[in-house]
Image (tube, helix red, strand yellow):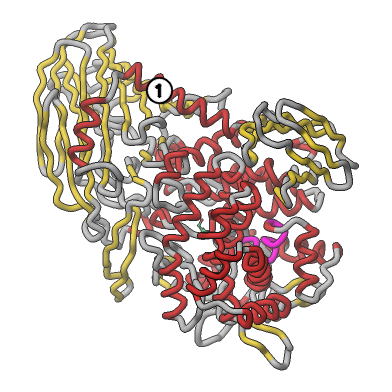
């Protein structure tokens, strides 16, 4: 990284997948991996293009079973652009001799530059510079500029610039046994001004896709088109002179039938590409759009950490941009950067929305609205399982039904195994938590009293119904679940899956019930009556919620919170022996299964589970929550709990180091920085062994940004105030960022040497009340700045 440029020098096939993921360009509407335009999908290259929310369902035969999976569809490839000296071989990094190769991702401008020098088999050299963008202002447009310079020869160059509809979803090796052809009815053609087009549709979801490409050359050229099954290209023969650069500009437009205000996607794409301005104008408007994004979200963090954070922010904004506010989409766990987890939406929004709330609240609102549109489905799912209220799916896609795969492959043992992670019903609490935090941060009471209230109440209703009273314990129990640590999914030797009394599930359920009661109490009278009538809610049900919210069972053992009932009885793993034997033991589940053992037998977690509570709730709120449940969670118990799980977690998810870094920083513990560093390195160093090549880890990326924004500052939007409770992290001692808070755009915050500086931009909005824990409360009016000394 230098300044705003993220760079890869040299061509390394083994690194290509990772680089393609990290050099993905996107604009919230669609994204394209940073693959070489002259390459097609193979074991090295994977040129994927994905439109947010574009899914398709197929059935496959695996492990002797018919299974159905819904995938985010790899759309026709718009990148193809190949070249050769006349009668030579088409050049690619795998066929030609690569003399130089550099990929530079310009974060400020949102462009990817590629510099290559090739020599073909007859010794003719080409210098190639390519620049590409996915337009941040007009999200349907993308551009690929190619500059070709013959070095040491003159003659003729052939160039083909096309669209390829023969693609499949084959970016993840583990899924290769599954059906992968999602596109059908691929038709291609040409239209005026040398435009080529391609249309197709997805096989079962019947989403129609239209793509048009216009390619121009700035030198005299013979032009035609080549068409073969599912592909079309504009072909040029260009006379070239040694040392003279020829520029080939390819502008493309993409539409799908999910877009509003179009007649049909093909017409829309052809029309848009025809009207697209020239490259300079496109570049200029794209830069302006990015400048505006950076103004709204950039953080000023010195050093390497700051550079990585900027890369993370770049990818978060490319997945969830202001354009997302217009779409019906959720938070895809792996961005729009690859096919891992099939583009599904998990609980990861828990790590993303709190960050977005303070920069792009309308995007948060849209993402919550995605959940609201699927509330009815979540109620059907609960009803089908014999429950009331809303049971959100662990993995969500198009319509909100449960998309978790039934079987998953352990690549280590080669066995297809049942996947029980769908029992992670805690995802519903994440939805409710995000509703509440969004409304706190933005003051959007209209949302809280309408869609927000409906979701919170139905989720609370589900928890109250799922909880069964146990006379012996005098407590409510939630049985048969899986917690955030998805390694444990059954008791040793049990006939069926599921665990009882997962502490994280129960404590967050108690929180949801308590907040839903708050919402029910504070709804405006008319709204209260309408909603209660409509969903048949009454006083007696609220009384029951009150009872459950105070009596959910939280198991303890050996002076620490138990991850679930019986966790303390599980065997201890010889961690050192496993580390010695395997080195990397993050995927301990796969290692043990391949040894015909099971992680279910051990006190060994994939990721933060109990400790998630310290991530979600500031200490006072967590204490109060435990008090409501009849427990005194003193500092010593929490410290012991943190130590216990820290020693028994393999960090098999990138979310784990983030949460540990956050929790340890808040507790002012020495190892915090090591975890923060790991969270920062997660994708750039591909710490989860090859997973980044299948898509970035969006939750961890956004989480690291939020770690500075809320984790270190202790920032909370509470009771109409901006509250701060900063903790020191010596390695990150000075930082600044801007937030959008209620009507104030661009409130500037800077922390340095024990002082917090706040600048509120000029406006007609009321002053902001700022409270520092254990310190002063002040009011800062628009146009004013203030510096507060932080206690301690
Ligand atoms: C983690 C989950 C996460 C999912 C998608 C899994 O590896 O265990 O917590 O939701 O990845 O990011």
Q: Is residue 644 above or below residue 120?
A: below
Residue lying farthest right? 792
- Asked if residue 359 is positioned above or below residue 544 in the image, the reply reads above
Estimate the x, y position of residue 530 in percent, counting from the top left: 51, 69
Tell me where residue 727 appears, x and y as whole percent. Answer: 80, 44
Q: Quick one: 156 or 311, which is closer to the camera?
A: 311
Residue 192 in percent (x, y) is at: 11, 26
Magenta stretch contains residue 612: yes
For residue 465, what is the image quadrant? bottom right
Above or below residue 145? Residue 713 is below
Quadrant location of the C terminus?
top right
**Front-most of residues 571 and 111:** 111
Residue lying furthest front: 526
Residue 757, by quadrant, is top right
Q: Quadrant of residue 549?
A: bottom right
Residue positioned 10% across, 39% down in the render: 228
In this image, 513 relative to 697: left or right?
right
Q: Residue at x 25, y 6 (%)?
A: 242
Q: Provide residue 648's location: percent of width, then percent of height.
A: 69, 65
Question: Which residue range is magenta in the image?
Answer: 607-615
Q: Determine which residue is flagged by label 1.
A: 285
Q: Is residue 504 visible from the viewing direction of this image?
A: no
**Which is nearer the eye, 318 or 485?**
318
Query: Do we see residue 613 in this rendering?
Result: yes
């Amino acid at each position: 990284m230098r300044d705003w440029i993220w760079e890869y020098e040299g061509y390394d096939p083994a690194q290509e997948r990772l680089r393609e993921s990290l050099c993905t360009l996107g604009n919230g509407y669609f994204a394209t991996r940073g693959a070489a335009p002259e390459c097609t999908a193979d074991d090295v290259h994977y040129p994927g293009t994905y439109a947010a929310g574009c899914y398709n369902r197929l059935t496959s035969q695996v492990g002797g079973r018919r299974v159905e999976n819904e995938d985010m569809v790899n759309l026709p490839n718009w990148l193809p652009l190949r070249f050769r000296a006349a009668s030579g071989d088409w050049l690619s990094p795998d066929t030609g001799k690569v003399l130089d190769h550099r990929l530079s991702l310009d974060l400020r401008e949102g462009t990817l530059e590629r510099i290559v020098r090739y020599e073909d088999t007859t010794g003719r050299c080409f210098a190639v510079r390519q620049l590409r963008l996915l337009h941040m202002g007009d999200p349907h447009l993308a551009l690929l500029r190619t500059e070709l310079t013959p070095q040491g020869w003159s003659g003729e160059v052939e160039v083909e610039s096309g669209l390829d509809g023969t693609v499949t979803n084959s970016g993840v090796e583990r899924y290769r046994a599954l059906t992968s052809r999602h596109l059908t009815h691929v038709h291609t053609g040409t239209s005026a001004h040398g435009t080529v087009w391609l249309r197709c549709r997805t096989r079962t979801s019947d989403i129609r896709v239209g793509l048009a490409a216009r390619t121009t050359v700035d030198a005299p050229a013979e032009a035609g088109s080549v068409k073969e099954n599912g592909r079309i290209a504009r072909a040029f023969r260009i006379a070239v002179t040694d040392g003279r650069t020829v520029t080939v500009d390819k502008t493309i437009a993409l539409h799908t039938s999910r877009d509003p205000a179009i007649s049909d996607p093909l017409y829309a794409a052809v029309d848009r590409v025809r009207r697209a301005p020239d490259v300079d104008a496109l570049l200029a408007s794209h830069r302006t759009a990015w400048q505006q994004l950076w103004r709204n979200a950039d953080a000023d963090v010195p050093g390497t950490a700051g550079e990585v954070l900027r890369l993370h922010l770049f990818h978060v904004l490319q997945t969830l941009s202001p354009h997302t506010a217009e779409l019906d989409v959720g938070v895809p766990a792996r961005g729009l950067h690859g096919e891992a987890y099939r583009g599904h939406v998990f609980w990861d929004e828990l790590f993303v929305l709190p960050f977005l709330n303070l920069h792009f609240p309308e995007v948060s609102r849209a993402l919550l609205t995605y959940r609201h549109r699927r509330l009815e489905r979540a109620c059907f799912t609960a009803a089908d399982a014999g429950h009331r209220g809303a049971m959100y799916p662990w993995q969500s896609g198009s319509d909100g039904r449960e998309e978790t795969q039934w079987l998953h492959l352990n690549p280590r043992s080669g066995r297809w195994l049942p996947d029980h992670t769908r029992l992670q019903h805690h995802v519903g609490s994440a939805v409710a938590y995000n509703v509440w935090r969004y409304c706190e941060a933005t003051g959007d009471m209209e949302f809280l009293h309408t869609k927000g209230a409906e979701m919170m109440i139905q989720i609370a209703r589900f928890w109250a119904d799922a909880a069964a009273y146990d006379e012996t314990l005098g407590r409510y129990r939630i049985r048969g679940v899986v917690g955030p640590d998805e390694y444990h999914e059954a008791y040793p030797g049990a006939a069926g899956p599921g665990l009882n009394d997962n502490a994280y599930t129960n404590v967050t359920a108690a929180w949801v019930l308590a907040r839903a009661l708050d919402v029910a109490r504070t709804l405006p009278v008319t709204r209260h009556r309408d909603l209660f009538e409509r969903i048949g809610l009454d006083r007696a049900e609220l009384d029951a919620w009150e009872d459950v919210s105070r009596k959910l069972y939280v198991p303890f053992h050996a002076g620490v919170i138990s991850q679930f009932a019986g966790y303390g009885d599980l065997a201890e793993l010889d961690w050192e022996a496993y580390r010695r034997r395997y080195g990397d033991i993050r995927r301990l589940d796969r290692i043990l299964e391949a040894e015909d053992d099971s992680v279910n037998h051990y006190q060994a977690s994939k990721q933060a589970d109990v400790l998630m509570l310290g991530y979600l709730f500031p200490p006072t709120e967590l204490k109060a929550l435990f008090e409501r449940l009849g427990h005194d969670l003193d500092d010593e118990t929490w410290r012991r709990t943190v130590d216990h799980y820290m020693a028994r977690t393999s960090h098999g998810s990138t979310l784990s180091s983030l949460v540990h870094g956050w929790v340890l920083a808040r507790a002012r513990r020495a190892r915090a920085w090591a975890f923060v560093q790991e969270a920062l390195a997660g994708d750039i160093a591909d710490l989860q062994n090859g997973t980044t090549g299948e898509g970035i880890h969006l939750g961890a990326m956004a989480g690291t940004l939020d770690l500075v924004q809320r984790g270190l500052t202790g920032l909370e939007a509470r009771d109409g105030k901006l509250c701060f409770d900063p903790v020191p992290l010596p390695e990150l001692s000075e930082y600044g960022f801007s937030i959008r808070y209620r009507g104030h755009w661009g409130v500037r915050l800077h922390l340095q040497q024990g002082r917090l500086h706040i600048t509120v931009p000029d406006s007609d909005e009321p002053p902001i009340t700022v409270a520092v824990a254990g310190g002063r409360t002040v009011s800062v009016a628009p146009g004013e700045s203030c510096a507060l000394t932080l206690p301690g």
